[in-house]
Image: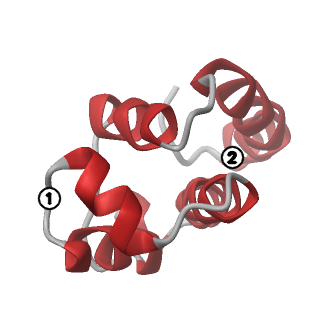
Amino acid sequence: MNKSIHSPEYAAVLGELRSARESAGVSQRDLANRLNVPHSWVSKVETGERRIDLVEFWWFLSACGLDPSPVCKRLIQKFLPRRSRRSKKGGGIK
């Protein structure tokens, strides 16, 4: 199995995070202050240098003043076609 951090799905997660922050009008530095983390943490997350888990994903979006549920639903819709293609090829998680 390939590392998920290099997958198109993870790229979609990162895109959603950055887009959410920018749409909320929050700078990386402001978001870092809200999360009580160094500002470099936000940059590293958005560029994929630092991997985040589901809880951090939720905190990130909530700190942007957003409900994470719609973002999760959008990501699921993006992932579903990919999962069915992987299942046919015999790869990926089942």
Q: Secondary structure at mark 1?
A: loop
Asked where in the image residue 48 lies, by quadrant, the reply is: bottom left
Residue at x 81% of width, y 43% of height: 78
Classify residue 17 as left or right of residue 47: right
Q: Secondary structure at mark 2?
A: helix
Q: Which corner quadrant holds the N terminus?
A: bottom left
Q: Position of residue 88 (x, y in %)?
A: 76, 40
Q: Position of residue 16 (x, y in %)?
A: 66, 54
User: Which label is found at residue 75?
Assistant: none
Asked where in the image residue 70 lies, by quadrant, the reply is: top right
Dot 1 crowding, Cα within 10 Å, few <14, some 14–19, many 20+: few
Q: Determine which residue is flagged by label 1.
A: 37
Q: Position of residue 10 (x, y in %)?
A: 53, 59
Dot 2 crowding, Cα within 10 Å, few <14, some 14–19, many 20+: some
Q: Determine which residue is flagged by label 2.
A: 86
Q: Nearer the viewer, residue 85 or 14?
A: 14
**Residue type, mark 2 in image:** Arg
**Residue type, mark 1 in image:** Val
